[in-house]
Image: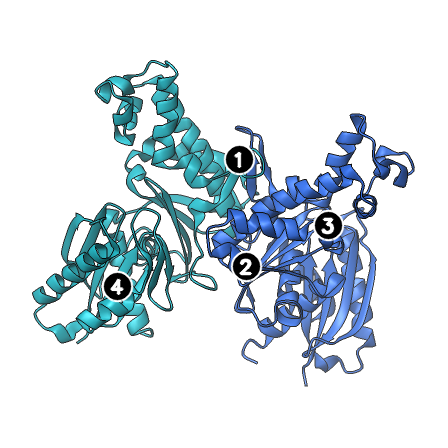
Chain colours: A cyan, B blue
């Protein structure tokens, strides 16, 4: 019985890997730092992880295939990682490289697409047909799921919702959702205020070093009532709300799943973002889009990879 | 043989109606002013047009059904026009009203969706699988076509691309594509400059009346080299380019079809908008999205209605 999928989810800082059965049970799971020295190192680590998982599967014939997630632009059809902003992968034919080592059908996709599919099939989106997921972290990734399938567009580049422009101060100076509402943007906003002399608990929580400020420290300060931290989250919530309004107007989804590291601080921005979305979107699109938190955490990409593998290798089960 | 569709396309100012055969031939076509006094008047005119067309069909049994387009939010499933910004239709169960008069299966959709489907099936998008259409006129409408089907989202409200926010100067002051790049925005921009004392041919071409300025007059002045007219079109092109970049990043379409009244002046903005799109979208999404002009003009909604009727009434032909 072919009922297992091997899944490797290459992230900008960590690579997760696992073995998943048809019911979405994670039989093995591990997470290691992503090597960043070269494309060879990244691909080598992915192959080593897959081989390690395969060696722990009792009967190899149970394995349907292998999924690979990569944090960037992927040519799904040909299994090529075209470009990754935070890793040295450029036009890497990773499907071919991995298949020649492992002799398993291999499917390669964008990591946010896989996370969205994982949440849609096994997590927060199980009952919904039209789903948009946003992963809020260092960057902002997007995934669009229609009827339990990833919407990829013509050439695999669709769903780049972090790169949706929502503000511009003129030619050449347009800002996308990621530039305004990511964890990186949150930290930068706070750093600017503290550099300009604004007092805040955040500074103490970061050991008196502006460079050491993290999203976690800002969240901690906000929970203690720090004014700068609260206003930085409020601004983040505003831009997220505008982004959600666009998603509601464009896709009219049943649910918008919010995941990524920032989702751990959702109590600091999600209600305000929802208010801005409903106020800004055309009615009733805003009211119809339920904002829900992701359920699968750092396993979403691995589980989505399994859903992709089962769906692609045996599409009509 | 059931091979004809009756189609009524209710617009903000004009209502078009026609009889279309399975090959997309328009056997009858007419366009009349849309009555705006009341919902009853709008619905009554639509029914009268449909009855007129039906009386001219030689064998009634050839008619598969009737389509209705409305310029606003439509509940496709129940055939209800929920809201139209420029007409007095509010929660009008137009499908039921029309079916009780004509005894024909009736399908109701947003007018921009129908125009997009018409272009996809019979016009500029025939060869493409993933299509986004923008109708640029008084407002900006959007339609998303995947595999010759309208993408409606969960409750029929998807594809509202004119309501995608691309600029904000703070809470409560977000501007959407329509507010920045429609014909109305173009006219308003010029009116403001002329009110502020800026000299321009446009003023003379409009009989010395700021209120009389039209998009056509601005286009005429631009073709004669008028500086204000050219700069107003350049600004329109910038915002359109940002909107196109968002469409490319979100949908990765093969083609973006540009229609509506402003498409008649496309030589004044489309190349610049394309340049901004390619410069702003992530690569290669921007390069992959071909900008093409609509081919069907004011017949797109009627032809799209026919495609919808044939597709819904006999889905597997």
Residue name at image x 76 percent, y 55 percent = B264
Horizontal arrangement in the rendering, residue B243 relative to residue A106 (left or right): right
As measured in the structure, the alpha-carbon distance from the residue carrying label 3 to the one carrying label 1 is: 35 Å
State which quarter of the image contains the N terminus of chain B: bottom right
Whether residue B82 is visible to the viewer of this picture, yes or no, is no
* Label 3 secondary element: helix
Mark 2, chain letter? Answer: B
Whether residue A263 is visible to the viewer of this picture, yes or no, is yes
As measured in the structure, the alpha-carbon distance from the residue carrying label 3 to the one carrying label 2 is: 20 Å
Which residue in the protein does label 4 denote? A67
As measured in the structure, the alpha-carbon distance from the residue carrying label 2 to the one carrying label 4 is: 28 Å
Which residue in the protein does label 2 denote? B289
Mark 1, chain letter? Answer: A
Q: Nearer the viewer, residue B226 or A169?
A: B226
Residue name at image x 71 percent, y 65 percent = B295
Residue name at image x 57 percent, y 81 percent = B317
Mark 4, chain letter? Answer: A
Query: In x, y percent, where is residue B171?
Result: 52, 28
As measured in the structure, the alpha-carbon distance from the residue carrying label 4 to the one carrying label 3 is: 47 Å
Disc 3 with disc 2 on a shared chain: yes
Which residue in the protein does label 3 denote? B268
Residue name at image x 88 percent, y 34 percent = B209
How many other residues sit within 10 Å of disc 1, few (<14), some (14-19) or many (≥20)?
A: some
How many other residues sit within 10 Å of disc 2, few (<14), some (14-19) or many (≥20)?
A: many
Query: In x, y percent, where is residue A241?
Result: 46, 37
Q: Nearer the viewer, residue A23 or B175?
A: B175
Disc 1 with disc 2 on a shared chain: no
């Amino acid at each position: 019985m072919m009922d297992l999928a091997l899944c490797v989810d290459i992230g900008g800082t960590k690579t997760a890997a696992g073995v998943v059965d048809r019911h979405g049970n994670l039989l093995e799971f591990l997470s290691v730092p992503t090597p960043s020295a070269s494309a060879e190192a990244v691909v080598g680590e992915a192959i080593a992880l897959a081989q390690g998982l395969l060696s722990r599967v009792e009967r190899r014939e149970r394995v349907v295939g292998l999924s690979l997630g990569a944090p960037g632009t992927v040519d799904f059809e040909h299994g090529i990682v075209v470009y990754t902003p935070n890793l040295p992968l450029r036009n890497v034919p990773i499907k071919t490289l991995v298949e020649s080592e492992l002799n398993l059908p291999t499917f390669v996709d964008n990591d946010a697409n896989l996370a969205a599919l994982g949440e849609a099939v096994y997590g927060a989106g199980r009952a919904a047909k039209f789903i948009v997921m946003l992963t809020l972290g260092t960057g902002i990734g997007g995934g669009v799921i229609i009827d339990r399938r990833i919407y990829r567009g013509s050439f695999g580049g669709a769903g780049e919702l972090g790169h949706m422009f929502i503000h511009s101060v003129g030619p050449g100076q347009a800002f996308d959702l990621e530039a305004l509402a990511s964890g990186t943007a949150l930290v930068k906003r706070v750093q600017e205020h503290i550099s300009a002399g604004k007092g805040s608990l955040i500074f103490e929580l970061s050991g008196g070093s502006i460079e050491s400020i993290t999203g976690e420290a800002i969240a901690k300060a906000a929970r203690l009532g720090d004014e700068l931290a609260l206003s930085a989250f409020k601004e983040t919530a505003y831009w997220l709300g505008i982004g959600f309004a666009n998603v509601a107007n464009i896709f009219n989804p049943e649910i918008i799943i919010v995941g990524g590291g920032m989702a751990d601080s959702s109590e600091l921005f999600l209600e305000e973002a929802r208010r801005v979305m409903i106020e800004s979107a055309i009615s009733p699109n805003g009211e119809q889009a339920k904002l829900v938190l992701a359920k699968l955490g750092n396993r979403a990409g691995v589980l989505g990879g399994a859903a992709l593998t089962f769906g692609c290798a045996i599409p009509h089960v």
